[in-house]
Image (tube, helix red, strand yellow):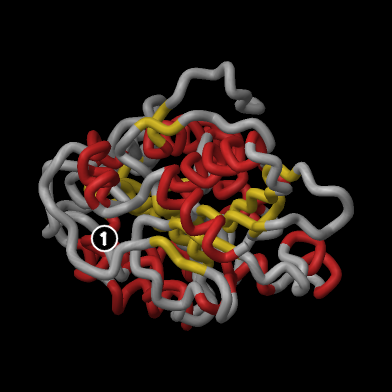
């Protein structure tokens, strides 16, 4: 289905489960599960039971609390047969326990889908031990892996499409705990290009400022763009779901999204700002988090850490 703004807001972890269950009906080789967090990761294929010695036809795998072993098992499944598509899940911060297995996925060109939920400070009161900060940047630095951070229903569906179609590399989907609205202009097809224009009111290809967001922060960039337009600004809002896929596009396409002549750029992402200078350039401004998180409800911590519409508007005025 296509998600419009009229469709109720939902967490991308829930939208992920809807996609997994839809794919399970048409992909008989889709198998997987969670490291004892299935009810939080939302990774249960509801029409199947648990894979056991006596029930080998079932497709839900209970990996237990052993993240590295889970990743290694999925590597073995993926490399055993190209007809099998394994997925596994935990909280995004717990990829630290399985990094070596994920690295082997990339090195061995294994199509493993890593479903990583609770992807930011937006998870709230669990606090800094559970809130990823440096993780997006670290996986963007790893060769031959797709790091995908969808913003809503369309982008979650697009991320699964990309993950299934890329047969020679693993994918990590970073998904939210908190509900996110479905935004006008998001696109399943756009995800396949890594980055694309969600909204733009400029004439030609030279907006006054470009606002770039990923995942849950695309909504913030989108709302900031709407407010700036009320003040007469020509604003482009870009979703950068996957840096790797965007890098692989033609120079002409990348120029159509991020024209070199427009140096007034603001990025917003609930994670480390490390690496964003590649996207925003020396004259842009990156809004992010370069310290550990805190235990608080998501709206409160977003405000405390400066991840707000007002902060994006102020930064846009500063750079343009």
In which quadrant is the N terminus drawn?
Answer: top right
Question: What crowding class fits label 1: few (fewer than 14 Cα within 10 Å), some (14-19), or many (20 or more)?
Answer: many
**Of residues 294 and 230, the one drawn nearer to the viewer in this rendering:** 230
The answer to whether residue 280 is visible is yes
Residue at figure coordinates x 68%, y 44% from the top left: 198
State the image coordinates of residue 96 (x, y, percent, origin top left): 23, 70
Q: Quadrant of residue 17?
A: top left
Q: Nearer the viewer, residue 308 or 248?
A: 308
**From the viewer's perspective, is residue 26 above or below residue 141?**
above
The secondary element bearing badge 1 is classed as loop
**Whole-percent x, y for residue 56 in the image:** 35, 43
**Residue visible at 47% across and 38% down in the picture:** 20
Q: How many numbered markers are drawn?
A: 1
> x, y percentage for residue 175?
39, 46
Residue at point 54% right, 19% down? 7
> For the view shown, which residue lies furthest in the right direction?
204
Q: Position of residue 180 (x, y in %)?
A: 43, 33
Left or right of residue 152: residue 166: right
Q: Is residue 235 left or right of residue 310?
A: right
Task: Please say if 315 is above or below 280.
Answer: above
Visible residue check, residue 72:
no
Quadrant of the drawing holding the C terminus: bottom right
Q: Which residue is mark 1?
A: 132
Image point 55% across, 56% down: which residue? 317
Q: Quadrant of residue 54?
A: top left
């Amino acid at each position: 289905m296509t998600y419009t703004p009229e469709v109720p807001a939902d967490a991308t972890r829930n939208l992920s489960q809807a996609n997994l269950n839809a794919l399970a009906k048409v992909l008989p080789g889709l198998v997987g599960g969670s490291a004892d967090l299935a009810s939080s990761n939302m990774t249960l294929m509801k029409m199947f039971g648990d894979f056991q010695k006596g029930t080998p036809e079932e497709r839900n795998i209970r990996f237990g609390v052993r993240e590295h072993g889970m990743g290694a098992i999925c590597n073995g499944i993926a490399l055993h047969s190209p007809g099998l598509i394994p997925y596994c899940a935990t909280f995004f911060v717990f990829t630290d326990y399985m990094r070596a297995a994920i690295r082997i996925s990339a090195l061995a060109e294994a199509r493993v889908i890593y479903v990583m939920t609770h992807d930011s400070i937006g998870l709230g009161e669990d606090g800094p031990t559970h809130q990823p900060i440096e993780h997006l940047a670290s996986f963007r630095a790893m060769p031959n892996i797709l790091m995908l951070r969808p913003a809503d229903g369309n982008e979650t569906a697009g991320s699964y499409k990309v993950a299934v179609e890329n047969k020679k590399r693993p994918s990590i989907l970073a998904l939210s705990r908190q509900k996110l609205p479905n935004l006008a202009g998001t696109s399943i097809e756009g995800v396949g290009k890594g980055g694309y224009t969600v909204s733009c009111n400029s004439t030609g290809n030279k907006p006054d400022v470009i606002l770039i967001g990923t995942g849950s922060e695309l909504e913030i960039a989108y709302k900031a763009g709407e407010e700036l337009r009320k003040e007469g600004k020509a604003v482009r809002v870009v979703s950068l779901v996957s840096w790797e896929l965007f890098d692989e596009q033609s120079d002409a396409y990348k120029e159509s999204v991020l024209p070199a002549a427009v140096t007034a750029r603001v990025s917003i992402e609930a994670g480390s700002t490390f690496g964003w200078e590649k996207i925003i350039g020396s004259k842009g401004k990156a809004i992010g988090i370069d310290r550990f998180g805190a235990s608080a409800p998501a709206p409160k911590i977003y405000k405390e850490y400066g991840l707000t519409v007002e902060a994006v508007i102020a930064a846009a005025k500063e750079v343009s």
